[in-house]
């Protein structure tokens, strides 16, 4: 029985805690600055394996005292990205395994620096993108003798967009603004490259539906570093419905909301609705040579909301939480396999998809499940993180 500390009882922390507790192999301490929020998570899973605490994890002294009083094997941060360096520092001090969900490049670099020489695992960027997308891309890239072009594309979209942005807040507002406003990294013509966010607009057609994709920050994770000198072009872009990028360019660039992020965050949370009726679209394309022939391979997946523990969870919650839990499970079940800073691409796609948590990526749910639970009112009656 492993004991883990989950920091943050929001959209991801709430499901992540439940998945681990429901497995029967984990005892979970869920901490949040709001005790009612933490207790709501614990009471939502009547397993007796989740204990709720009130804790402001941005307060060094408070977090230090909690770690001293409640011994755990690992800490999982589902906090805003800017909180993670402190959590990583204290995890290192207390010799704990560390996992987070950040997409922020600078925070990941800070965590990697903190982890140098550690005997425990420090695995930032768990989840979907970064996270699972790097694992899937790495698998396809390993099939080629020479790699030419690698495209990673991911989108968390409302199934039925109902506003001009064709978007709904399925993810952290801070995270979305960070992705749209920070520099993007990749490889171009065989060399490390920097790209501007909201640029590189392209169209993609998947299963008969047209999407757009454009540069966003952080989703590539550490893949560009891992494949430096071994690939011609490597890019990550976010998938949206056509027209979204143009609106975001007006807001972020022309109206300079990228310089006023707190104001932009308040505007988004006030005007853009949330939904549990979403779909996560995952697309990886790799081209290169195999046995002397120019070939291309693709990984394409669409994940819909799933019902877990009697509650409907959005696709972005499922994919992010399941991806993170699979990595946590693989590390703690195989203590000798990983040590120090661990990149997501070090995990094998087959191991993740066969893992009890990673199987969520293979479950064949459709839009009908969430539509049914919305029609009957079940979705509206459930606890909403």
Image: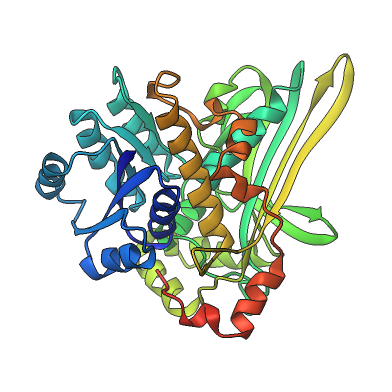
Residue at 40% x, 42% y is: 25
Nearest the viewer among 22 and 342 is: 22
Nearest the viewer among 369 and 168 is: 369
Q: Is residue 132 above or below residue 373?
A: above
Residue at 59% x, 31% y is: 351
- Answer with the quarter of the image where residue 43 lies: bottom left
Q: Can residue 217 be seen in this view?
A: no
Q: Locate residue 273, reporting x and y percent.
A: 51, 77
Residue at 9% x, 46% y is: 61
Q: Locate residue 324, reporting x and y percent.
A: 47, 43
Q: Is residue 335 above or below residue 170?
A: above
Nearest the viewer among 314 and 22 is: 22
Position of residue 8 in the picture relative to residue 307 (left or right): left
Q: Is residue 24 above or below residue 96?
A: below
Q: Can residue 62 be seen in this view?
A: yes
Outermost right residue: 293
Indicate how the structure is coloured in the image.
Answer: rainbow
Q: Is residue 16 above or below residue 38?
A: above
- Answer with the quarter of the image where residue 384 lies: bottom left
């Amino acid at each position: 029985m492993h004991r883990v500390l989950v920091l943050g009882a929001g959209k991801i922390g709430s499901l992540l805690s439940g998945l681990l507790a429901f497995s029967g192999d984990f005892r979970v301490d869920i901490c949040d600055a709001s005790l009612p929020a933490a207790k709501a998570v614990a009471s939502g899973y009547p397993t007796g394996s989740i204990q709720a605490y009130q804790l402001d994890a941005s307060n060094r002294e408070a977090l230090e005292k909690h770690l001293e009083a409640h011994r755990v094997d690992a800490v999982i941060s589902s906090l805003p990205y800017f909180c993670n360096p402190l959590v990583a520092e204290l995890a290192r001090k207390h010799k704990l395994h560390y996992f987070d969900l950040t997409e922020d490049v600078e925070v990941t670099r800070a965590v990697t620096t903190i982890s140098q020489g550690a005997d425990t695992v420090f695995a930032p960027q768990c989840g979907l993108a970064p996270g699972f997308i790097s694992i899937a891309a790495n698998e396809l890239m390993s099939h080629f003798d020479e790699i030419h072009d690698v495209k990673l594309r991911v989108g968390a979209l409302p199934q039925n967009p109902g506003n001009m942005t064709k978007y709904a807040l399925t993810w952290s507002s801070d995270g979305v603004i960070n992705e749209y406003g920070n520099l993007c990294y990749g490889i171009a013509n065989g060399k490390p490259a920097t790209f501007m966010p909201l640029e590189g607009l392209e169209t993609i057609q998947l299963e008969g539906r047209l999407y757009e994709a454009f540069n966003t920050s952080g989703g590539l994770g550490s893949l560009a570093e891992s494949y430096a000198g071994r690939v011609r072009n490597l890019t990550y872009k976010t998938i949206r419905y056509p027209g979204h990028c143009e609106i975001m360019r007006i807001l972020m660039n022309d109206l300079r909301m990228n310089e006023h992020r707190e104001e932009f965050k308040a505007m988004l949370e006030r005007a853009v609705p949330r939904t549990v009726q979403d779909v996560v679209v995952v697309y990886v394309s790799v081209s290169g040579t195999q046995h002397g022939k120019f070939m291309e391979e693709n990984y394409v997946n669409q994940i819909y909301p799933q019902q877990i523990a009697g509650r409907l969870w959005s696709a972005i919650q499922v994919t992010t939480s399941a991806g993170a839990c699979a990595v946590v499970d693989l590390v703690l079940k195989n203590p000798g396999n990983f040590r120090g800073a661990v990149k997501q691409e070090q995990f094998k796609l087959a191991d993740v998809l066969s893992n009890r948590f990673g199987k969520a990526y293979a479950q064949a749910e459709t839009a009908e499940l969430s539509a049914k639970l919305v029609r009957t009112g079940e979705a509206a009656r459930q606890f909403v993180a």
